[in-house]
Image: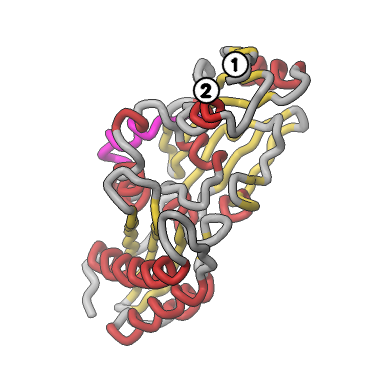
Amino acid sequence: MKKFEYHQPQTLEDALKTMEKQGGEARYIAGGTDLIVRLKQRTMAVDALVSLRGIAELHGMTQNGAWRFGGMCLFREMERSPTLARAFPALFQAVRVLANPQVRNVATIGGNLCNAAPSADCAPPLLVLEARLKLEGPGGVREVAIEDFFTGPGQTCKEPREILTGIQVAPPGGKTGTAFLKIGRVSQDIAVVNAAVLVEMEGGVCRRCRLAAGAVAPVPLRLRRTEELIEGRRIEPDLLEAAAAKAAEEVRPISDVRATEEYRRAVAGVLVKRGLLQALEAVGGSM
């Protein structure tokens, strides 16, 4: 592994200034559960790392109407929060199956998003919750919708010198149910396919539907055409089958060492169908 400088700023301002001074290839590091592996495997090299671990304002989560998760909020902290489990069941379910407790003790929600893996477990629930991301850099502060954040495998709209400082999520209103499902080759594995569902029901009719899937496209994907199929209708057996077929058609998977394109299409449809049933059950709905 190539030698590199390691900086440990204690404030956001110092982190930005430190990064500004760097020449060559420099990266911010959060939990490091992916970055350090890549450095050890020599699939990437850096001249400097700027750690965000010591910046107190990036840690933790707060609730004031909407929820705010600091970019350095640990997954372990999230999975230990019963309040989070009640407010955002799908996000809580995703966190609980992400890797293992050892990884969740150091991995962060900001790092998971900035890593931009198409299979990132926390991306689909945040997509259906329509989260907003706050980015801060030398040019100032800006906010982006999570759907606009991912631009390709391992790529985001974040500039190299920007920091993902926070994720804001508004609790769903009305009679809303959510669900998250994941299929991997074995326990603790990267997702072969994952999916999140949100349905808001009114008088037995789906007033609002949000669907997202991971590991089925170059980026975590909102399934907008499948959403349109469901909204304004009762969720009945025929509609569930049609939604599964539409989702399988809408995703854009590849074949790789974990699964074939055909398998991923089929599983995406199955997970959407199961997720709709679970979300409907969560709000006391029936078919």
In the displayed structure image, the side of residue 198 where residue 130 appears, left or right: right
Q: Give the image quarter of residue 159.
A: top right
The number of numbered badges drawn on the structure is: 2
The amino acid on which the numbered mark 2 sits, given as a three-letter code, is Glu
List the residue tagged with mark 2. Answer: 57
Q: Nearer the viewer, residue 204 or 282?
A: 282
Do tag 2 and tag 1 residues touch (Cβ < 8 Å)?
Answer: yes
Regarding residue 193, the answer to whether it shows in the image is yes
List the residue tagged with mark 1. Answer: 11
* x and y, in percent, of residue 276 in the image: 32, 69
User: Can you say whether 266 is above or below 30 in the image?
Assistant: below
Colour approach in the figure: secondary structure
Pointer 1 local density, CA inside 10 Å: few below 14, some 14–19, many at least 20: some
What residue range appears in magenta?
A: 72-84
Q: Which residue occupies 33% across, 79% down?
A: 240
Pointer 2 local density, CA inside 10 Å: few below 14, some 14–19, many at least 20: some
The local secondary structure at tag 1 comes to loop
Q: Which residue occupies 51% across, 65% down?
A: 253
